[in-house]
Image (spheres, rainbow, N blue to C red):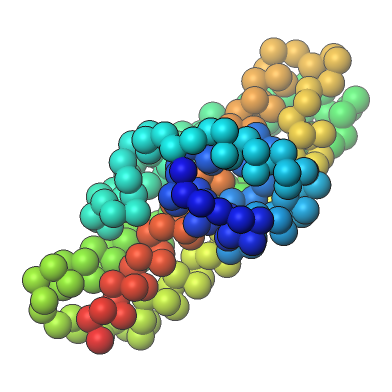
Amino acid sequence: MMTFTDQTPVREIVVANPSAVEILEQAGVDYCCGGEKSLADACNAAGVSLAEIAARLHQNGTKPAPDADWSIAPLARLAAYIVEKHHGYVRGAIQRLQPLLAKVRGKHGANHPELAGIESLFQDVSREMTQHMQKEEYILFPYIEEIERAAHTRSPMPPPPFGTVRHPIRMMMDEHDAAAAIVKEIRSRSSAYAPPADACMSFQAAYRELHTFETDLHQHVHLENNILFPRAIEMEDSLV
């Protein structure tokens, strides 16, 4: 495990030790959209003990990354992994959850009016993520692959229409923030995905899937905000 202090940015901790993600996720500490915050500030924002989280991170030790060391793997490979694992998950979850939430709201909405708002919010984040993933797959990720190819072959690149990769990356990061805010509101309205006493099996399944959707979003954004995007910017700068 890397040496860190309470002022180390959270993103540096999770990039150095991917297994730290599980600890921070369970504690509700933001390591994705707010990855630039210090560990102290991130713990404070989550309302959890800095000392406890730091101790757990130290005790966790260094474990191998579950899939690869994305801090050094080819950018094209990381982008393909994001599309296959996370974009694929999101599209499947949308297909499962939209009809499930409609069913649960139809059956339990009279006694649980929060379900209408949760369903509407999920429709919002579904639209946001569908458009977001298309922009990444058809515009940003192919350009990042071109950057990597040019860097490896030491060949010049034609200037992109958006000037620099920083511009679409900034847009994608803003969209990450927007999606995370919607999911945070879903968490709040669902009482942190805790089904009520009268919840049927479908109600319980919907909340479990929403919780999984949130966890996947955090991991998805972490790989982009904290690893893929900074490495792409650094590689583009090396070509100037």
Q: Is residue 98 visible to us here?
A: no
Task: From the top left corner, tell me how far across and down residue 211 is, in percent.
Answer: 64, 33
Give the side of residue 150 with respect to residue 68, left or right. left
Q: How many marks?
A: 0
The answer to which image quadrant residue 118 occupies is: top right
Task: From the top left corner, tell me how far across and down residue 84 is, in percent.
Answer: 34, 41
Q: Residue furthest right?
A: 111
Of residues 189 and 222, the one nearer the viewer is 222
Write the residue at 28% across / 72% down. 235
Write the residue at 64% across / 61% down. 7
Give the side of residue 108 with respect to residue 72, left or right. right
Does residue 130 sit above or below 99 in this rendering? below
Does residue 101 sit above or below 75 in this rendering? above
Write the residue at 37% across / 47% down. 82
The answer to which image quadrant residue 71 occupies is: bottom left
Of residues 47 and 16, the one nearer the viewer is 16
**Image quadrant for the C terminus?**
bottom left
Write the residue at 55% across / 53% down. 4
Task: From the top left corner, tell me how far across and down residue 79 is, in percent.
Answer: 32, 53
Task: From the top left corner, tell me how far across and down residue 74 is, in percent.
Answer: 23, 55
Q: Is residue 126 visible to us here?
A: yes
Of residues 65 and 32, the one nearer the viewer is 65
